[in-house]
């Protein structure tokens, strides 16, 4: 355990240095959610009528969760980059904990995300979104967001380590953009066809989005939804922990394999 903490701390510094020396990527990943918020909020928001709610109030939590789900894309790309540029092979030759390498990447991404969602929250507040729940509930919503981001980053790391090339990882990572579209992040699911609504409501993003909306006090839980959406906090926790339990050990084993 002491080796994991020591080695993970040293490698965490490496990943944070990479972020520092690649400011363009950091700026792009942090500004794109804000661009989407402005675009969806002012372009689509003028055309969409939400029963009993303002669309921007509905949108902000969904976009926060969509940003957290992007951990799959960033985790995959960074792991594939290190793998196919020889960095992973060099790290394998060092006498360090095998779990420290992917763990440090996931923690660095988590810290970057925690900083990056602050501007998104501020822009949302400027657009009229408000936190209607208690301070403790709001902290719970942020905690769920970061837990989900941590879990999706591990999924991305596993896929990146298994990728055949950087290009393949980039293409597959870009395809994950579709995942929030098949959820309730941007629009309610009750207007979807039955089969599509079932798919959308069993999407982990839908459970996390509904939980975040409920904890922020922005929306009520639909009574006729699938179980993860009807019990959003429990559903969000179960999805996040399940993704983490499946992907983290598999990613460590994949990394340790020569």
Image (spheres, rainbow, N blue to C red):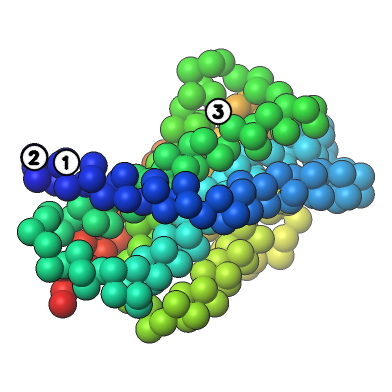
Q: Give the residue displayed 35% in from the left and 75% down from the top.
A: 85
Q: At 47% across and 81% down in the image, what residue appears?
A: 168
Label 3 residue SS: helix
Regarding residue 202, the answer to whether it shows in the image is: no
Helix, strand or loop status at disc 1: helix
- Quadrant in the picture for residue 222: top right
Query: Which quadrant holds the N terminus?
Result: top left
User: Mark 3, mark 2: which one is toward the viewer?
Assistant: 2
Q: Which quadrant holds the C terminus?
A: bottom left
- Residue drawn at x 42%, y 39% as measured from the top left: 111
Viewer-proximal residue, 132 or 74? 74
Secondary structure under badge 2?
helix
Dots 1, 2 in contact, CB < 8 A: yes
How busy is the neighbourhood of tag 3: few (under 14 within 10 Å), some, or many (20 plus)? many
The Cα–Cα distance between marks 3 and 2, rounded to whole angstroms, is: 36 Å
**Residue at the spot of label 2:** 2
Name the N-terminal-most of marks 1 and 3: 1
Pinpoint residue 244: horizontal percent, then vertical percent: 32, 52
Left or right relative to 20: residue 104: left
**Image vertical order of residue 101 relative to residue 7, above or below:** below
Residue 159 pos. (x, y %)? 37, 70
Q: Is residue 10 left or right of residue 19?
A: left
Q: Which residue is mark 3?
A: 215
Number of numbered discs visible in the structure rendering: 3
Residue, x 78% and y 38% (percent of image)? 56
254 lies above or below 191 = below
Mark 1 to mark 2 CA distance (whole Å) = 5 Å
Q: Which residue is mark 1?
A: 5
């Amino acid at each position: 355990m002491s080796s994991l903490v020591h080695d993970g701390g040293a490698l965490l510094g490496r990943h944070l240095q990479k972020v520092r020396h690649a400011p363009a990527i950091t700026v792009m990943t942090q500004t794109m959610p804000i661009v989407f918020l402005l675009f969806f909020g002012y372009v689509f928001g003028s055309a969409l009528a939400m029963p009993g709610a303002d669309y921007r109030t509905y949108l902000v939590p969904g976009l926060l969760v969509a940003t957290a789900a992007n951990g799959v894309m960033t985790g995959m790309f960074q792991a594939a980059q290190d793998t196919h540029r020889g960095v992973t092979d060099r790290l394998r030759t060092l006498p360090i904990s095998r779990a420290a390498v992917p763990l440090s990447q996931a923690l660095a991404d988590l810290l970057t995300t925690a900083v990056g969602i602050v501007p998104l929250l501020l822009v949302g507040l400027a657009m009229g979104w408000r936190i209607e729940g208690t301070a403790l509930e709001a902290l719970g919503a942020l905690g769920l967001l970061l837990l989900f981001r941590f879990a999706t980053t591990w999924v991305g790391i596993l896929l990146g380590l298994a990728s055949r090339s950087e290009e393949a990882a980039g293409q597959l990572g870009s395809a994950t953009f579709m995942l929030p579209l098949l959820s309730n992040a941007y629009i309610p699911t009750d207007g979807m066809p039955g089969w599509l609504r079932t798919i959308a409501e069993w999407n982990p993003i839908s459970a996390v989005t509904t939980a975040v909306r409920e904890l922020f006090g922005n929306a009520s839980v639909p009574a006729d939804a699938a179980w993860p959406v009807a019990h959003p906090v429990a559903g969000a926790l179960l999805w996040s922990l399940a993704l983490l339990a499946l992907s983290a050990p598999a990613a460590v084993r994949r990394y340790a394999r020569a």
